[in-house]
Structure formats: C-alpha cells, structure tokens
Amino acid sequence: MIENLVSVTPDEYARLFPTPSTAFGTAAFNMLNSAKVSRIEFLAGLDSDSRPLMGMIAGLRDGIWRSPFSAPMAALSWNRDISLATIESFFTRVREHLASYPLRIVLPPAFIAPQMLASITGTAANMASSVIFDYNYHYDLSLAPYFEKRLKPKARNKYHQAQKSDFAFESVDIARAYAVIAANRTAKGYYLAMTLADLEATSSIIDIDAFILRHDNTDVAAAIVYRIAPGIAHVVYWGDIPGFEHLRPMNILPYHIFTYYHAVGYTIVNIGTSSTDGIPNHGLCSFKESLGCTLSLIPTITIHNA
C-alpha cells in the first residue's frame, strides 16, 4: 500500500525510478519539455518502509494536470509487481495531492505492460469523470517475415507496384529525414509540432532512428522512430514528399521499418493513434489495418477533484 505520496526533485525521481514504463517517463525527458507547462510535479508513492512503489510525472497547463504534457503517453513508473490495492491507494493520494485542478492521464498501449496497465486503467477509470478511447495501431514483429502475405489485397497490389520502383532504404541522420517530413507536412497543410532542434535535443535522452527511402538521387519518404522501451519502437513521424505518390513509397516504407527492427530483435513497432478525442480518422485506420497492424484502445482518463 502507498502510505505516503511525496513531491521530489527530478534527480531524486530518477534515482527512485530508474526504469520507467517508457522513455517518455524519465525525469530527463520531462525536464527537457518543462517549459511547456507552468508547473511540474514528480510524485513518488512510498510504502510504510519508505520504499518507492509507484511514480508519476505531471505538468500543469491551462488549468489541467497532464500526464503526459509533451508526449504520446503518460509518465508512469513502478518498481515491482504491485497489488491492485496499492495502485488504488496511489491514485487516491495523487488525486488528493493535485486536488486544485483535474488530472488528465493518457495511458500507454497495453502491450507495454499488459497486467499492470489493465490494473491502472481499471483503477483510474473508476475514479474518472470522463474516459475517451483513441485508436492505436502497432505491428507485431514476429509477423514481419510474412509481411506480404498479411497485406490486404489492395495494399498488396500497391506494395508490388512499389517493389518495381527500385527504392533504396537507408539509415540517416535526423536532419535528413526531418527535411522530408517537413516537406510532407507543408504540402498537406499539417502542423509539425517538433522542430529539428527539438528532435536533436530529444536524441540526447531517447535513442532515435531516422530512415529515408530514396529513388534515384531523391529522398522521397522518411521515418523518425524512437526506441521507447526494451524491444519496442515508436514511429513519431513518417511521410513522403509530393510528386512521388504514384511510386507508392508509403506502401513499402513500413516493410523496411518492420524488417529493420525485426532484424535487431525488437518485438513491436508502435505506429500510434489514428483518432482525435476518440473520433477515428478512417483513412489512417484503414491504411494501418491494410498493413496487418493490430488495433488497441488508448484511454484518456480525466479525474476531477476528490
């Protein structure tokens, strides 16, 4: 059980929780992004012997405590298998500690820690004033050798078209891949949340891989991928540049990414959510499903004052 909840320094939090659930849960990552919130709390739940059992990092912005406040999933840590009662006591104390404002938690995908996250989801949802589910897709890399067979018929046809285009897949520096992503977002009129400087700063904390797909001497598609947990990669950005869609680069880029991480012994590539506030983007969902990705639901749980 959690007997005491304490607010600690970033350095102390890092010492108490050396292996957070994902790389987004480290003190260093959250301090790097601390300017995006007006206040940040590093919370540690201790047992009767003052041993740290569970921790969470949250940032205050626009009258809401947020975990995460600059990442796709919450900054949660735990040090051992802990009971449902312990999880409940942790969130009860967190709610009391942050009582001035509501708390919004976006939980990691269940594959990060299936039993623990099921317990956290159930506990937090029981305290919630609202729960929204977003649509998340990941690729099971044990299936990578059978990529083509698992494609849906239209996707398989486009993949075959892409195979004829003589693409070269390369691991490159972040700046080169970012240039492709920026061109893609500009062409589509989409907001690009991270600058190149943001990514390069993050790369000092999280291992980042960058890839391009080249046709002749032109970089036509790219991906930027974080290694967020043992055996788990997370696609932050991917996309192609205008004018090369007819070559189907986005129908072969996933194959190369999945094959790459399968070859280095990873188990999952997370492609991320394809919805906003629970409303699915049907085009994105269909594309990821056509690749053979697995759907799971990501809860965003809002807990108001006790």
Image (cartoon, rainbow, N blue to C red):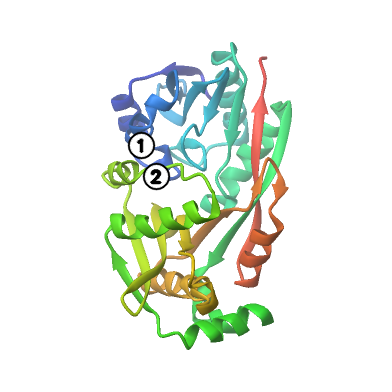
Q: Look at the image and tell me whether residue 229 can be seen.
A: no
Q: Which residue is mark 1?
A: 29
Q: Nearer the viewer, residue 1 or 168?
A: 168
Q: Is residue 236 above or below residue 28?
A: below
Q: Quadrant of the N terminus?
A: top right
Residue that extends furthest to the top in the rendered view of this protein: 100
Give how far across and how far down residue 193 sits, in percent.
Answer: 46, 42
Q: Amino acid at mark 2?
A: Ala
Q: Is residue 288 above or below residue 22?
A: below
Front disc: 2 or 1: 1
Residue at 51 percent across and 44 percent down: it is 191
Q: How many marks?
A: 2
Name the quadrant containing residue 38: top left
Mark 2 touches mark 1? (CB < 8 Å): yes
Q: Real-space Cα distance between discs 2 and 1?
A: 7 Å
Q: Quadrant of the C terminus?
A: top right
Q: Nearer the viewer, residue 88 or 95?
A: 95
Say few, some or many: other residues with alpha carbon within 10 Å of mark 1 (under 14 / 14 to 19 / 20 or more).
many
Q: Please tell me which of labels 2 and 1 falls first in the chain.
A: 2
Secondary element at image label 2: helix
Give how far across and how far down residue 267 sits, in percent.
Answer: 46, 65
Q: What numbered label is drawn on residue 23?
A: 2
Give how far across and how far down residue 81 sits, in percent.
Answer: 50, 42
Q: Amino acid at mark 1?
A: Phe
Residue at 53 percent across and 37 percent down: it is 82
Secondary element at image label 1: helix
Q: Is residue 32 above or below residue 155?
A: above
Left or right of 246 on screen, residue 167: left
Say few, some or many: other residues with alpha carbon within 10 Å of mark 2 (under 14 / 14 to 19 / 20 or more).
many
Q: Look at the image and tell me whether residue 219 can be seen.
A: yes
Q: Is residue 198 above or below residue 126?
A: below
